[in-house]
Amino acid sequence: MTVAVLLLALTACGPVKYGGVSQTLTTPELKYRLIDTIGSPLFCGPPVVRIPSDAEASQEAATLRSQDAASFDAIVHHEKLDAAHLTADDDRRIVQQVQVLQALPLGADGPRFRFDYIAGRPSPEHIVGTIDAHGTISLESHDPTQFPGRGGCPICLAATVRIATPDGAIPVSDLRAGMLVWTVDAGKRVAAAIAIVRHTPAPFGHRVVRIVLADGRAVVASPGHATADGRRIGALNPGDLLDGSRVVTIDVLPYSGDTWDLLPGSSTGTYWADGVLLGSTLANVGQ
């Protein structure tokens, strides 16, 4: 279908239908059908893009191949790669495409799957509809929208994350400037007053990362949030060290509502979020 015909179809009244294929498609193949027919998902990733080394990209691609063959096969086919002779650039493309597929969730809706995402078209559009196992698409709405929203892409904590304070763990959304929190200063755990608390609405389709550590601690934050040593949550991999414990699992989850951050009045600006020592994104924000 040409771009002109597609745009004409999208301006018609009522659901717009796109025919499917004879064979049953895997979930990743359905996502690529939506991407090719309707548009790629727009999503907020880390503000500092992680470019994996050749060895890291090769390992991540190999892990995907062994643990999620459907996604690996769909990516290789869609990107026209030779699975038997993957180059380092091919491996990096596979890693990047995993993020694209994760940004397009499909929810079961009877015999079909429902999609609801922001598509990158000539201008961003909020796309809603269903797709069946054969790739038949019913596009119910396609409304112009803004992406990202005011304030840009969130790089902060989920509202329910609890911050360690001398009065116990308190949800970050309940904290205010002047309240005391535990932080690190001169290598010691000390109480310090909060200098800044900020929050920003998450744009439609925002994803957060849930990190689970080997010692049982877990925290949920935007991919761009800083660790205490300056890395980004979204750049962590299973096996990496975070606050003295190994990362066991990493899950990407949908999130709506505001994201939050704070800046303690200490030399490090760090604090404990759900028991995990993190950095602040507000170090360079004026009060």
Image (cartoon, rainbow, N blue to C red):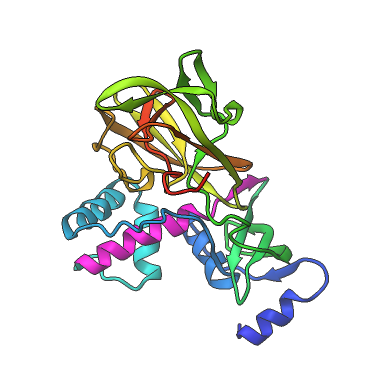
Q: Position of residue 111 (x, y in %)?
A: 65, 49
Q: Which residues are magenta?
A: 88-109
Can residue 215 be seen here? The reply is no
Left or right of 205? Residue 182 is left
Tell me if residue 274 can be seen: yes
The foreground one among 21 and 115 is 115
- Residue 188 appears left or right of 269: left
- Residue furthest top as drawn: 167
Q: Which residue of the protein is positioned furthest toward the left in this rendering?
A: 55
Q: Nearer the viewer, residue 241 or 125?
A: 241
Res 225 → quadrant:
top left
Residue 29 in percent (x, y) is at 48, 61
Vertical placement of residue 130 versus 108, above or below:
below
Residue, x 30% and y 45% (percent of image)? 231
* Residue at x-position 50% and y-position 13%: 167
Provide residue 53's location: percent of width, then percent of height: 20, 58
Residue 179 shown in magenta: no
Which one is nearer the viewer's eye here, 22 or 69? 69
Q: Quadrant of residue 2?
A: bottom right
Number of marks in picture: 0
Residue 11 location in percent, x, y?
77, 76
* Quadrant location of the N terminus in the rendered image: bottom right
Is residue 28 shown left or right of residue 232? Answer: right
Q: Is residue 37 above or below residue 230?
A: below
Dominant secondary-structure state across the stretch colored magenta: helix
Splitting the image into 4 quarters, where does residue 20 fall? bottom right
Residue closer to the observer: 216 or 261 = 261
